[in-house]
Image: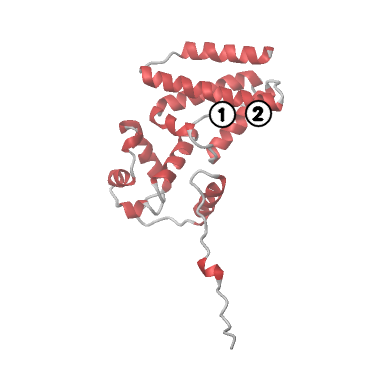
Amino acid sequence: MTVRRRPVRRSLFRVHAVPAPGSAPWWRRHEERLARRRPHTDGLTLEVVLTEALALVDAEGMDALTVRALATRLGTGSSTLYRHVASREELLVLLVDAVLGEVRLPDPGLPGRERVEQLSTELRRVLRSHPHVVPALSGSPILGPNAMRASACGLDNLLAAGHPPERARTAYLALLDYVLGSVAFDAAADSGSDDVFAFGLAMFLDGLERG
C-alpha cells in the first residue's frame, strides 16, 4: 500500500532575512516604519532619542553609547527605547545620518568651485563639532537621506565646476578622505588650523583643474 504524505507548507517555515542596518533595504524599511508610526503617549520620539544619543557621545565618547545608558539618560527603560531602535547598530546608523543632517548646503547659485570649497569646509565644521562620531563614518557605505543629500550636492558642485562625471565622482571621494583625515588629525592633536585646511583644499582643487 502506498502511503501518501501530506505536502509540507514551506511558507510556514520560511525565514525572512532582516536587512543589515544601514543598507539600502534597511533604510527603505525604516522610512516605511516612520510613515506608519503613531506618536507614543510618553512623548518619546526618535528625534529626542537621537539628540540625547549625540549628547552622550559628544560628552563621553562612542564607547559610552549603549541602549541601557541611553535609556537611563532618557529616564526610561531599555524596552521602551527598543520601540524606536532595535539595536545599538541601528542607533549608530541613525546617529551618523543625524549628524550629517547638520551640514548646511551651499547656495546653488554660486560658482561650482566656491560651492565645493564651502561644502568641504562646512562638513569639516560639523564633524569637528562631533569628533567621536567620525570613526563611524569610515565603515560601510553611508546611505541615509542626509548622507545622500550631501553626496548629491557634492557631485553636483564638482560637475558645476566643469569636471566630467567620472572625475567628479573620484574627486568627491578624495575630498571626503581629505576632510575626514583632517578632522581625525585635529582630534588626535587637540588642535586644528583652518588656514592649513583651506590651503590644502585650494591645492587639491588647483591640481584637479590642471589635470
**Can residue 162 be seen at all in this image of the molecule?**
yes
| Quadrant for the N terminus in the image | bottom right
- Where residue 45 appears, as percent x and y from the top left, is 40, 49
Nearer to us in this view, 60 or 149? 60
Q: Quadrant of residue 110?
A: top right
Nearer to us in this view, 139 or 73? 139
Going by the numbered disc 2, the residue's amino acid type is: Asp
- Where residue 185 appears, as percent x and y from the top left, is 42, 19
Q: Residue at x 52, y 29 (%)?
A: 104
Q: Which mark is residue 37?
A: none
Label 2 residue SS: helix
Assess disc 2: are there few (<14), some (14-19) or many (≥20) residues with their C-alpha within 10 Å of its C-alpha: many
- Where residue 172 appears, as percent x and y from the top left, is 60, 25
Q: Which mark is residue 156?
A: 2
Up/down of 150 relative to 162, above or below: below
Q: Residue at x 55, y 74 (%)?
A: 8
- Where residue 77 appears, as percent x and y from the top left, is 29, 52
Up/down of 30 relative to 95, above or below: below
Q: Are marks 1 and 2 in contact (CB under 8 Å)?
A: no
Label 1 residue SS: loop
**Can residue 119 be seen at all in this image of the molecule?**
no
Q: Residue at x 43, y 39 (%)?
A: 95
Of mark 1 and mark 2, the one earlier in the sequence is 1
Going by the numbered disc 1, the residue's amino acid type is: Leu
How many marks overall? 2
The residue to which callout 1 is attached is 105
Q: Residue at x 38, y 30 (%)?
A: 132
- Is 88 situated left or right of 201 in this image? left
Camera-nearest label, 1 or 2: 2
Assess disc 1: are there few (<14), some (14-19) or many (≥20) residues with their C-alpha within 10 Å of its C-alpha: some
